[in-house]
Image: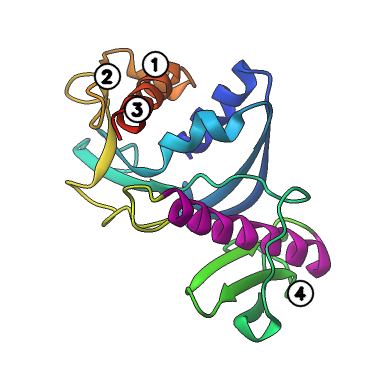
Amino acid sequence: QMLVRMYTRWAERHGYTAELIDELRNEEAGIRSATLHIQGDYAYGRLQGETGVHRLVRISPFDANKRRHTSFAAIDVTPDIEGTINIEIRDDDLERETFRSGGPGGQHQNKTESGVRFRHVPTGITAESRNERSQHKNAAVALSLLKAKLYMIEEQKQRAQVEKAYDEKGEVSWGFQIRNYVLQPYTLAKDVRTDVQTSQVHAVLDGEIDDFIQAFLRQKAEREHRK
């Protein structure tokens, strides 16, 4: 939930639009998974380096003993290719599943299976959408997301990038993170890859991540220049 807010605020600062197109909330609090659609010039180019595992250290508001807790979240960034690049998926390679798209319960529980999940059999990659009211619209959104993920894999293969595959970020745990956000016992936001850091972690979580973005892009450009 904190990362969704961070990227939403960053988008707003740059005049981009940020639409939450899929969200699965935890039963108690927070978000289990979410998909943001960010639109604007060079949005993907700027955000591509955010792919990876993010680590948060804070005093949990749900712990009566006020102990420090560590949380991890995996971020994927995919380009919006709808209408610009044609990705063909054979019907035989596609599995479709529908599910109830409501939350953990209550009066807004969705009684119909309007949520749609697609699985690309050859790669095992999945994409889903649950926020639209109709199954047809959710299917269109999920298929678009799946195509974007498949395109990302092909793009990386063609450009022979260091990463082996689109979502191979390692475990969502200690030792695999690309960035740390520490709120207790001190305040620090640090990118593990570029060593860029700041004690203004609250400002970072409020969307001020340009220093991290620019440092990653400079590092990437230098690596490509040396090749």
Q: How is the image coloured?
A: rainbow
Residue 38 falls within the magenta-colored stretch: no
Asked if one can make out residue 208 in the rendered structure from this viewpoint, the answer is yes
> For mark 3, what is the residue?
225
User: Magenta residues, as a range?
Assistant: 133-159
Q: Secondary structure at mark 4?
A: loop
> For mark 1, what is the residue?
211
Distance from Cα at disc 2 to Cα at disc 3: 21 Å
Where does residue 64 sit, x and y in percent of width and height? 26, 41
> In the rendered structure, are the residues bearing label 3 and label 1 in contact, judged by CB atoms less than 8 Å apart?
no
Q: Amino acid at mark 1?
A: Asp
Q: Which of pointers 4 and 1 lies earlier in the amino acid sequence?
A: 4
Residue lying at 33% horizontally and 51% vertically, measured from the top left: 163
Residue lying at 57% horizontally and 35% vertically, measured from the top left: 44
> For mark 4, what is the residue?
112
Horizontal relation, residue 133 to residue 86: left or right: right
